[in-house]
Each structure stands twice: as C-alpha cells, then as structure tokens.
Image: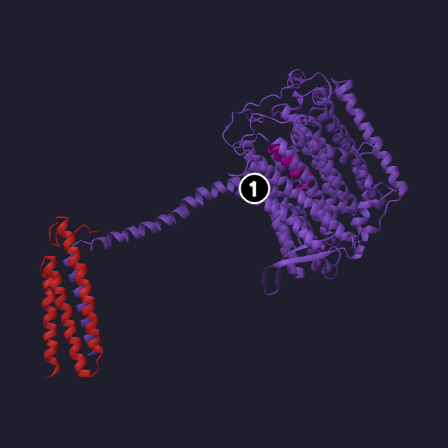
Chain colours: A red, B purple
Amino acid sequence: MSIEWYIVLSSLLFAVGATGILIRRSPVVILLCLELMLNAGNLALIAFSRMVGNQEGQVFALIVMVVAACEVVVGLGLIVAIFRRKLPLDVDELRELRG
Amino acid sequence: MSVSFWAWLVLLFPLLGSIAIGLGFRVLPARAAGAIGTAAIALSFACGIAALVSLLGDEPEARHHASSLWNYASAAGLDIKLGIFVDPLSIFMVLVVTGVSTLIHLYSFGYMESDRGYRRFFSYLNFFVFSMLLLVLAGNFVLLTVGWAFVGFASYALISFWYRRATATRAGMKAFVINVVGDIGLVLAAFLIFRELGSFDYEAVFAKAPEVFAVNQWTIVAICLLLLLGAFAKSAQLPLHTWLPDAMEGPTPVSALIHAATMVTAGVYLIARTHVLFDLAPTAADIAAFTGLATLLVAGTIALVVTDLKRAIAYSTMSQIGYMVVGVSIGAFSAGMFHLMTHAFFKALLFMAAGSIIAAMANRQDIDAMSGFGKAMRFTSAMFLVGALALAAFPGTSGFFSKDEILAYAEARGGMYLIFTVLGYVGALLTAVYTFRLVFRILPGTPCNPAQELIETGQVVHAEPENPATGEAEDTEVGFPGPEHHIAERSWPMKVAMGVLGVLALVGGLVQVPGVDHVIASFLDPVFEDSPLLEVHPTVGAEWTGLGIGGAISILGIALAYFLYVAQPATPAILIQRLRPLHTLFARKWYFDELIDLLVVRPALAIGRFANRTFERVVVDGLVSGTAETVRGAGGIVRLVQSGFVRSYALLLIAGFAGLALYFLLASS
C-alpha cells in the first residue's frame, strides 16, 4: 500500500477538524475537533515514519498525544469553569476580550 | 605602630561615629548620641597625637609616609589607590581639625541639648570631621576631590540643618552651588595634572612637576589657577565668598567648626600642599596673594558696618583667611599655617561665646539690640573678650604672633611684596576696630531686656517659634531649635570647651615667638624644603619691629573703637551721615551679591526659561507626544482585528497557515 492513501486520509481528517472548529459554536465540540486535527497529524507522522524506516516519527506521535492530553485537561477545565459561573456555553457569546 | 596605622585610625573613628549615630538615631538616647559623637572625635584626636609622636621618631627628612589600602581604579596608565599621605603638614591639619572639633562637639553636647534634631546633628558633624580628615590626609588628587566634595555636602547639610526655615535652606543651596563651582575647578586641575604628568599621586606629581614644566609655562599656570578656583570657593575668597555670611543660618557650633575653624581653611591647606606647583607658577601665586589681600580688606570694611553678630564674625573670618592665603601664596608657609591654627582657636572661641549670647537673646542676632552682657554673663563675656583680644592681635595673645609673622615675611621678600605688609597693617587696624566695635556694643552699658531678666530672675528668655532673620512663624514639629536655650554659665560642657579654647587663644602663640622658639616652623619646614622661597627669612630684629608696629596698631584700633563706641557714642551716627555713600557700599557688602546676581544668576535663569519655553515645550514635547500619538494610531488599526470571536481568530490562523503552505508549495515547484 503506498503512502498516498495515508496522507489523503490524514488531510481529510485535518480538514474535517478545521471545518468543525470554524463552524461549530460549542466549546466541547471545538475541543473534539482539535483532537481530530492533532490525530490527523499523528497519522501523517506515523505514516512517514514507516516510509522512512526509523522510529523518530513515532516518538513525535507519542509526544503529540501527551500534549493533546494536557490540552484536553486545560480545555475541559475551562469548560467546567464556564459552566459553573453560569455563562453561556457558546464561544460567540464569550467575547470579553475584544479590543 | 607605624605612622600610617595611626592615620588610618584617625579616619576610622569619625566615620564609625557618624554611621553608628546615623543608623541608631531611633534607638539611641539623645545624650548617648552626643557622647558617641564626642568620643569618636576625641579618639581620633588621640590617634592624631600618636601619629605625631610616631612621626617625630623619624629623621626630619624622612617624615613622609604614603600608605594605601587597595586600588580604587586601575586601568591602562591609570592607577588610583585609596591611599593617604602623612607628613608634618597633614598631621598638623589633623591635629588642628580633630582638636578643635573635639571641643566643639563638647560644646554642642550642651548647646544643642533641646534641639529636636540632636542625633542628626551629631551624625552630620561626625561625617563632616571624617570628610575634612579625608581631605587633609588624601594621598592623591582623586581622594582629595572626594574629601573636598564630602566636605561641601556636610557643610550644605549643616547650614540647612533647621530645614523648615526657608532662609536656611536657601543659604545651604547657595553654599553648595558655589562650592560645586570650586569643585569643578579642582577636578579640571586634577585632569590637567594627569594629562601632563601621568599620575594623580602627590609624590609622583610633585617629583615630576619641576622636570616637566618650565617656570610660568601656561599649562602650570592654568593648573594653579584652577586649583585656586577650588581653594577660593571653599575658603570664601573674592569673588566666591558670598556664601559664607549666609552660612551663618546654621547652628552656632556649625559656624564655629565649619565656617571658621576648619573647612574654610581647606583652601589654605590646598595651596600649601601644592606649593611645588605654585613655585613653578609665580604668576598664579601672586594672583592668589592679591586676591587674599583684596578679600581681607573688603571683608574688614564690611565687618565694620554689619549689625548681625554672627555675620560680623563671619566677615572677620573671611578677612583672616585672606591673611592665610597671602601667607601661603607669598611663601610664608609655616607662618600661614600658624595663623590657621591660632585663628581656629580664637575664632571658634568667639563663635562659641556669640552662641551663648545669642541663646540668651532668644535667637536674636542683631547687635543693635544687645548691651550690658558684661554684667549678665560674666564667663561668656570674659571668653568673648579673650577671643576678641586674640583676633585684634593684642600684644601677647596668639593672633599677635601669627599675623605679624606673615607680614614680616612679606617685608623680608621686599619689592612688590611690601604692599602686603603695608595693607596688611591697614587690615590689622580694621580688624581691631571692628572686633572691639562688637565688644563695646555688647558687653558694657545698661543691660538690654534679656540681660536684665537674666540678672534679676536668672531666667533665660524662651524663644518664640519664629525665624530670627525674617520674623515669620515656624513649624515646631521638626527642624526647630526648641524653645529652651543653653548658655555657657549653666552648662558645664560648654564651659569646659570655651575655657580650653580661651587658654589656647591666649597662650597658643607662644609656641612660635621670634628669637625664642619656632616649634611650628621647624616642624613644618621639612615639607617645604624644596621651595626656593624658604630661603627668605626675616631677621629676628625685623620681626620684633613688626610685632611692635602690629601691637601699636592693635592698641590704636582698640582705642579708636573705645572712642567711637564708648567715649563718644554719637560719633558713629555722625560718621555714617557724613560718609553716606561709603557706608552704603559697605552695608550692601560691596554689591557682590547683586553683581553675581546680574552676571550669573539672571542669565542662567533666562537661559533656563528660554530652554523651557522654546526647546522643552516645542521640540522635546513635540517629539515625545508625536511618538505617543503614532503608537496610539497604529494601535487603533490593530484593535479592529481583536473582535473577541474565537472562531474568527481560528479562521485567521488557518488562513495564514494555508497561505504559507501555498507559498512554499509554489516556491518549491
């Protein structure tokens, strides 16, 4: 099986994730889409790693997973905090930081 | 123990005292602060004595020691050490400074007792003594400048000691600014010396100078004139003298210590210390001598008419320093230093007695309001009289021997220098008249109200919280002398200090009587042995002739003052009427303040105003607010992007990355 299929799948996943971030307003879904994009990257990394024949790409994929886990912790924490303060769970409503 | 060990200890004690009192001012009891301050200076004096004994153990030719603790700055060709130079001249100054300071600290212990700033006062005073000792012990021009500037600061802090008084702070600023003018002269002179001779060290400079410079070459004259600028500012010689009379705003012990006995003689010390350079620049030395002469005459005439007691004594200080400057500039080094010593004794004594009288007058200093203190305060009056006799060079007192030695030397040099002898005697007549004008106005006569009250009830008048100079009401919270005052009759520290100085002022001159002994000269002369001027010696006969003339002039002056102020008290008023323009000239202090105001202060203010209006407001403000406006405008544009919509940020991010990816794809294909 050639590498192209892996790359195409990875790109599709990435595009789905990016689109989800752009069009959805719920922070939970946005987090899910972020995960999707990260895992698209992981897939590409592992595919290339197999193609080249060494393990560096796989190590990177592991690091990305760790980072993703951390990011989810922070993101979910934020979401819980938003919920607790009875703020709307809608990123368009939360625009305190406009310049 | 070596000489330099003791000299370092001399420096150490006042510094420790100042730091200890300064840090402990909240916890120390007031008396303890005074005791620490006085003890520190007394210890320093004891170490000075030890250094003297140790120095006398050496051969007269070998009596100079340089010692350094560490390198202060060391770079290519530059080698400045934290070093001191000990020789008879510096030890002489150390002994005069620490000796008189000890007594004045003792006096302050009693005199300042009710002052709110008692601890601050002693911390400043110890710092001053440290700075002055640093100045006289410094082994190179850099450390000399440091001591010079420290002394200027200490003087500023002590003049403005009662800092809620507008007149006091103004006087402090005036003194500081004029002293800084002198500092600039000293610093420039040091730079010029370094450029020409490649060293700041006294020993190296003085050894090299005769090889490098021809006599009266313009560089050496310039160096000496710059040194003189420093010396004149510190020693209150024309035209940089206007700060000294104003400096009398400080407490009286400060006037006695700094503005009579020690700091103002720093210029005399500087000229004596750098006599090697002045020997190579006779023109500069002559300029110095003539300035000294002009100062002694101008100050003498002003002292004739001033009605403020402390200011009158201050003008007499200027005048006496004029004698010293004449002495060390024409080559009468040991005579000049001798006069410095005796002057320190009798002038400090006069100020102390004046302080006691001013305390009894509840801060008033106007001699027109004083009379009859002879009955009210016997001890103070006796001491005032002793000081006045020594100042007027009455035969047998200390001033008698020291002043005439300078004039006899000028006569022995002959030629042009005879002017100094003749006008010096004119100055001596002025001295006797103005001194005994004070005596006859204050001591005899019917007692004035405060004196009467002192005789009848034994009460010293309480002072109202008001500025004695302007009469305006004062804050009694801080920086206020306190309502109580202390007179010598009631305070043993003041009495002891004045008694010791009184004895010294009377007999201090006996260490150097022509034809009998010459302690000062034989001690100091090794320092000046390389000077060609040391060859000049007045004969013993000529000196005694001079002493005879001086004594006669002194008695004549006192008699004249007696005639004017006691026998015919109406005469001064008539004289003032007849000689109205002259009186106005003297009373307005020869218009020096107005002259400096016109030539320096007003142009400087005008330049400042111009710079403020034109340059500051238009150019600087334009640049600054222009920058601010530009940044604000740019920020306004960037603000539009910050909409607060997270998704639009994400869009921008993705679009940006997509754009970059596109660019690289296109670039690589």
- Front residue (pair B423, B405): B405
Quadrant location of the C terminus of chain B in the rendered image: bottom left
- Front residue (pair B440, B188): B440
User: Is residue A43 highlighted in magenta?
Assistant: no
Question: Label 1 is found on which chain of the structure?
Answer: B
Element type where label 1 sits in the image:
helix
- Front residue (pair B380, B329): B380
Q: Is residue B10 above or below residue B358?
A: below
Kind of residue sitting beneath label 1: Ile
Q: Where residue B261 appears, x then y in whole percent? A: 69, 39
Q: Which residues are magenta?
A: B244-263
- Front residue (pair A79, B175): A79
Residue at x 70% of width, y 39% of height: B100
Judge left or right: residue B123 versus residue B430.
Answer: left
Residue at x 59% of width, y 31% of height: B113
User: Is residue B259 highlighted in magenta?
Assistant: yes
Residue at x 25% of width, y 51% of height: B636
Dominant SS type (magenta):
helix
The residue that mark 1 highlights is B21
Quadrant location of the N terminus of chain B in the rendered image: bottom right
Q: Where residue B39 appears, x then y in whole percent? A: 64, 41
Q: Where residue B82 appears, x then y in whole percent? A: 62, 56
Residue B233 shows up from this direction: no
Q: Is residue B504 above or below residue B190?
A: above
Residue B461 shows up from this direction: yes
Judge left or right: residue A52 versus residue B168.
Answer: left
| Among the 4 quarters of the image, the one containing residue A62 | bottom left
| Among the 4 quarters of the image, the one containing residue B445 | top right
